[in-house]
Amino acid sequence: MSQDGGCYTWIWTCFFEYSTPKILLIRSRKVGAINRFIQAVIIGYVIGYVCVLKKGYQETDTVLSSVTTKVKGIALTNTTAMGLRVWDVADYVIPPQVPTKPEKEEESSFFVMTNMIITPGQNQSHCPEIPSATANCSSDGDCMAGFSDTRGNGVQTGRCVNYSASAKTCEVLAWCPLEEDVDPPEPPILAAAENFTVLIKNHIRYPKFNFSRRNILPHINSTYLTNCVFSRTTDPDCPIFRLRDIVSEAQEDFQDMALNGGVMGIQIRWDCDLDMPESWCVPKYTFRRLDNKDPENTVAPGYSFRFAKYYSDGEVETRTLIKAFGIRFDVMVFGKAGKFNIVPMLLNVGAGLALMGLVTVVCDWIVLTFMKKKNIYKEQKYSYVDDFELLSEEIP
Amino acid sequence: MSQDGGCYTWIWTCFFEYSTPKILLIRSRKVGAINRFIQAVIIGYVIGYVCVLKKGYQETDTVLSSVTTKVKGIALTNTTAMGLRVWDVADYVIPPQVPTKPEKEEESSFFVMTNMIITPGQNQSHCPEIPSATANCSSDGDCMAGFSDTRGNGVQTGRCVNYSASAKTCEVLAWCPLEEDVDPPEPPILAAAENFTVLIKNHIRYPKFNFSRRNILPHINSTYLTNCVFSRTTDPDCPIFRLRDIVSEAQEDFQDMALNGGVMGIQIRWDCDLDMPESWCVPKYTFRRLDNKDPENTVAPGYSFRFAKYYSDGEVETRTLIKAFGIRFDVMVFGKAGKFNIVPMLLNVGAGLALMGLVTVVCDWIVLTFMKKKNIYKEQKYSYVDDFELLSEEIP
Amino acid sequence: MSQDGGCYTWIWTCFFEYSTPKILLIRSRKVGAINRFIQAVIIGYVIGYVCVLKKGYQETDTVLSSVTTKVKGIALTNTTAMGLRVWDVADYVIPPQVPTKPEKEEESSFFVMTNMIITPGQNQSHCPEIPSATANCSSDGDCMAGFSDTRGNGVQTGRCVNYSASAKTCEVLAWCPLEEDVDPPEPPILAAAENFTVLIKNHIRYPKFNFSRRNILPHINSTYLTNCVFSRTTDPDCPIFRLRDIVSEAQEDFQDMALNGGVMGIQIRWDCDLDMPESWCVPKYTFRRLDNKDPENTVAPGYSFRFAKYYSDGEVETRTLIKAFGIRFDVMVFGKAGKFNIVPMLLNVGAGLALMGLVTVVCDWIVLTFMKKKNIYKEQKYSYVDDFELLSEEIP
């Protein structure tokens, strides 16, 4: 056509060309109704699900959080090993440092000792090993000098000595006297820990929205803070928690858990819709036991570890070995905030509308397969170019 | 048409059928110009924003990092409780371990004690409680044996004794003498901590690209390392930081912060374009105060915790209780690296080009609504099949 | 057409209108074959890559994990500083607490001391500084009272004293005697640590699927657990690892690593297809050295830190300074689980099918450019509306 107008004209023509698909408009009640119905479903989905339910018009951000914890409480114990003794924070929170984990970690944990097996006055010397398959002996020949069992307490000296009136075991070089292999004391030594309280200070930030907030809400004053204790019904905003309440909110018994130790999760959830008033953005506290208290779990149930306090009189070093049982509290902060933003809104609405393409596919299939007048529609919709050699004589 | 060639022919025909939409080509300056302009905008967006700005042709990876810190410095103090005393790393970095956090955590922190309230020579005995609403008394009747206030320091014995010449408080069984309830000493005891230095070794890895790098850059030799101190202007690559500089880079005053303690963030950012020379991939250090120094924050401002050192002469256990104030430094490593990869490039360019579909929608709307010759275009673009009963007589 | 039926009729008509593109069907062996081939490639990609390889029909979740570790073992050492001495867990695992990191962190680490430089009996007093550029002196004039070098050990008193028969250094107020600046002892003092074992208890959870599992598999009983040691060939399910095996699996030598310390990664991978039987979901253990043992890395290689144990006889405080070298083991848990879900399946299949749009683009290009009969096709596919003034006389 225009190609004979010279090269210049041809480029000119090409540049100003606009191609648009040719459309067949079918005016029919049935087809139209199906068409509009499917369109309505898709628009309903975009508005209802994407916009209202999923808040697709919002930009979201996940929480950055920092947590500080401060435990308070005093316990009085009366044991044969130590006599009457008072325990304060520096004694039962181990390691001593009240940990504040940094922003990127979103969690913090502290350990409160609730029970213990104490072995005071240990020093490096010789004593009989605790009876076991590898330690029992009847004569020196059963013991091997220098041998140390991985599950034993020391290095054998090669001698077989009396462990008790009835049993003989190999002598070991070890921190003697050895810790006795017994179950933790019942009731737990620091049963009074159930009345300890912990102040949890949590500062969160949504960096995308430059939004900060603390779990000590604006209406909380310092008089209230020095007296309140969290209670889901009466004091839901108080950031001071009694340990027993934390455990019982998780449907557990504190004294049971204190015996062998365990791990409790303190979950703080900050889900905020920043299109709403700021005061609606409040933390929700939930509590959950994290370790497995499965009775089949016979391998070292609970939560315990050993540590020692070392003393020296300048010549001999002695230590007090403590097998500590207790509850580790993990403070975990979760959260997602959303705020209106034009970009995700356009993206989500756009993606929703792209589904409109489905309408044609479905309607075409219905129209060309099930409608009585399908042949009329086909004739109008399709043109044909036949190019088969074997069929060529059939082309009109 | 060809269906009468039998079933075989019909399948054959179907299989070798190709359907393509029929297109109306409009050759018009106005329409063409609009068409090309919208196309140019979309291509410009794809190239400019997706490819150049967002580097959509790159595969990205986030950093894995491990951090080691080593604090150095000596401080001399002269207090009534301890006399003249020298403090070294093992004394003021708590817990003692220089922490190296593993790869997946991307952060590491260490605490430097800057101020303290020391209560030496505590042992389990009786002494009057610190005056408070629940501890003040006038006679033994005001005190309850066995009672322990959560905010108190011990378990009451039931006796009311002289706390001072003017005040009487309940006697408690506790670690006596009790810690005095005073503000931290001013100026801070370890004010000299501002001159301490910390060596931060940071090793990063981009696992997808098998790319590793250290913040001790290749041109740094060990002579330089033993003498340099980070300075944004003169020594921007030195990984040794003076604590005062860290704090002042964050627009804070070290002595202010040392008094009550606080939390400082040391942010190391590794944003690398791995299509560029490797030597361009260098860390950027920024410093930020992380805790809230809000004056309204009356509830335990700063950063402090209590710990105790236990001593024993074999019979009586004594302890030195230390309420430590100090600065926790959180080293946080961030980073993203990109490298050319064909897959994300195709994906991004493809998604960009999918926008081309918009051109037809917009142009169709303009052409069929605003152009003078819109009826000519409509006639050509649309065919009609009318199927309304009530309109059926109108169909030509 | 129907617009003359009044406003009501017009809306009616519009509402029940359905527009579908007009299609040209080309029946040709060549074009059809190309068309079907490209379709087959895309369907093959969707089924083969998206569905089978990438399991696009599955919803995925990442693992939440909690880890507990328990080290066991006894070592016997014989040094001049301490004589014959037995070391147990409370002595060589630092900090004492066996750490269990909470669910969100996915990792846990413990440090086993393997070598050390011990300086017992330090107390606050005067002694000559370790020789160095700033500490060497020939007379009191070279020393400055009150000066403390960041890299030194104490605060100078201003006097120049004999360090040895041949060298004089400034006297410092410090914890004396000072730690000698020597290389770590070789062979490592706690070389026997290679036989220590660690029990790693790992409990994982896929919250989306409410699926939990432990690395102590159901078929493991407690008798087996007390005796087994992990071995890739004979005991691949035993969760007790000998430290030497961990190091040698990573192609490293334990004694080499024990000398200066280092960091080992214990990676537990839980990749589970939850459409398969639950018993197929088992952990895979791999081991890797994490720190850089690069010989060029002359700045403080290995992994070491200083800590002190404090003693007091009631008047003078003494401490034992320990520079500990050792191996930090980082337990890292990775994992992804997938389970059939209709939503991601539809999304992935849909996205795959959207690629079908490419078929038309490619085929059109081939048909209209390379086929002999391209002009016939063009005539059928395109209609033209020419609207150029300068070309208007050319329009037929």
Image: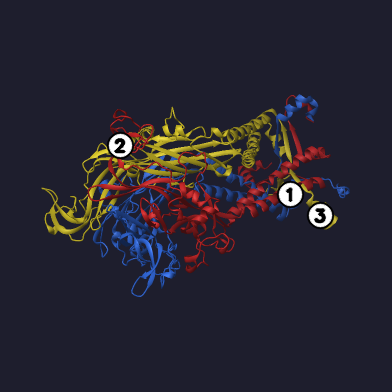
Chain colours: A yellow, B red, C blue
Is B70 positioned to the left or the right of B41 in the image?
A: left
Is C7 positioned to the left or the right of C231 in the image?
A: right
Q: Secondary structure at mark 3?
A: helix
Q: Nearer the viewer, mark 3 or mark 2?
A: 2
Q: Nearer the viewer, mark 1 or mark 2?
A: 2
> Circle 1 sits on which residue?
C377
Q: Secondary structure at mark 1?
A: helix
Q: Residue at x 32, y 67 (%)?
A: C186
Q: Which mark is residue C29?
A: none
> Circle 3 sits on which residue?
A10
Q: What amino acid is labelled 3 in the image?
A: Trp
| Quarter occupied by the N terminus of chain C | top right
Cβ–Cβ below 8 Å for labels 1 and 2? Answer: no
Q: Residues within 10 Å of mark 2 (few under 14, many from 20)?
A: many
Percent coordinates x, y for residue A166 in the rendering: 11, 48
Q: What amino acid is labelled 1 in the image?
A: Tyr
Between B375 and B118, which is closer to the camera in this rendering? B118
